[in-house]
Amino acid sequence: MNIATLPTRHARYRGEHLAVVFKDQRLTYRAFNARINRLANAMLAAGICKGDKVATILPNCLELLELYWAAAKVGAVVVPSSTLLQAAGLKTLLNKSDCVMVVSAPSFAETLNAVRADVPSVSEGRWILVGETAPDGYVAYDTFVADSPDHEPPDAGIDLEDPYNIIYSSGTTGEPKGIVHSHRIRGNYGAIFASQWRMTPESVVMHAGSIVFNGAFLTLMPWMFVGCTYVLMPGFDAQQTIDVIERERVTHTILVPSQIVAIMNTPGFDAKRLESLEMLQTVGAPLHLEHKQRLIAALPNRFYELYGLTEGFMTVLDKYDVERKMASVGVPTPFNEMKIIGPDGTELPAGEPGEICGRGPMMMQGYYKRPDLTAEAVVDGWLRTGDIGYVDDDGFLYLVDRKKEMIISGGVNVFPRDIEEIAVEHLDVTEAAVFGVPDDKWGETPVGAVVLKPGTETSAEDIRAWVNARVEAKFQRLSDVVILDDMPRNVAGKTLKRDIKARYLGEA
């Protein structure tokens, strides 16, 4: 019993159902499972064994989807990695994760060339590049699978507790850590979130962001659990996303806040073109109320918001709770528990902010080869999220801010999100990020970074004055505002405040 059985099951019982759409390729479950099997058997022929780590450095493509399921069938552990990695970061990741095979794209060969000599665990013949041909020293993916049979590979003897993947955290607040998920954990993603999203075998799921970050698995696993159709986009483009939702009659999709804002700001945005949607979920960061209200007015009874950590605790604001709990991020998913604790570790009553803690069946096995960090994050079976929030009398969670992003100004706790919510109400502002900088008098003071709507000429000083006239307290006033063309983001679409702060302080 493991997730590798799912594509096999659908190929047998609903083989002609459309499984995957990517660009102009449309594969049934029977055809998709055959491709998975060819790759799985090729991996076995190359000596890949149960427990071996296989790194991917790929953009969205069919080969990446195939590898996710082929690895499951042979018991290998997938290490999805971003194509934005530089050579130094890639070398560290490959060595720390003990990878023995790398599957990447030809465009990434130059970066791979710079690290290959320093990654001795990956032998010759195990550096694979997607495509029909590959430069010297690499094996072309098409060649790798060409002579491989498409029958089911031998039973790998996989146990539910065997690791399936290592997801390296996006590193918005520090050095990325390898988060280990087992077959059982990913199976729970499939069952729990299929239920949460009201997903059925007739659903059509679209994913426009990178599928190397954990947020992608929120629909990728339930897609395969129920055996519906998965539309994978090469990347995000607002107009193209609208076109594909309309053409493919997409029912479920996940977008990060910046993507939702981009769609709503697309010239000629028409909610009627998105009428097939049953779920439009945001993940990665809170969607500010200004944008949330506009989206819900355009597409009622479709919006879900998920708060969660790759480490394994999640809450969901259901589409039918949005109207009455607009500012909330919902309640724990089934079988999960939550509590809010104070500095001394005691549980706090409703309405009192503290650190959010959770536990449940999707919690990580731990940080790979870092029991010390695992012990810091998981205390007495409870995951310490590092986020500040409170629950109302109904048990709904409200985020206050990240513990590490909190600004202490004159001894007072200042939460950036409170100021950001006001900043995005300005008619010329599409996005805002607030961070703290050192101040001789107050210790820290808040600074705002904003992205303006195209064609606007509002000055940074005008925005600062506008925001400062509307904050609730003097200690929330911005000491400065900078205007950016766009927010720096990681591969998951999360805004990198530390990068903005470093540039502001001249440290980048």
Image (tube, helix red, strand yellow):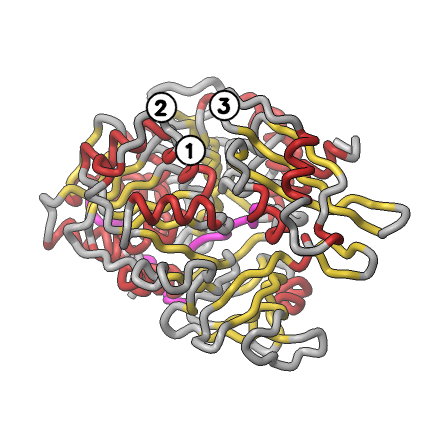
Q: CA distance from mark 1 to mark 2?
A: 32 Å
- Nearest to the observer: residue 399 or residue 99: 399
Seen at 69% across and 45% down, the residue is: 435
- Nearest to the observer: residue 192 or residue 154: 192
Q: Position of residue 301 (x, y in %)?
A: 27, 54
Q: Position of residue 265 (x, y in %)?
A: 40, 31
Bounds of the magenta span? 150-170
Seen at 38% across and 25% down, the residue is: 140
| Residue 150 can be seen in this image | no
Q: Amino acid at mark 3?
A: Pro
Seen at 52% across and 42% down, the residue is: 425
Q: Which mark is residue 131?
A: 2
Q: Which residue is mark 1?
A: 262
Q: Amino acid at mark 1?
A: Ala
Q: Which residue is mark 3?
A: 454
Q: Is residue 192 magenta?
A: no
Q: CA distance from mark 3 to mark 1?
A: 12 Å
On screen, residue 368 versus residue 64, left or right, reads right
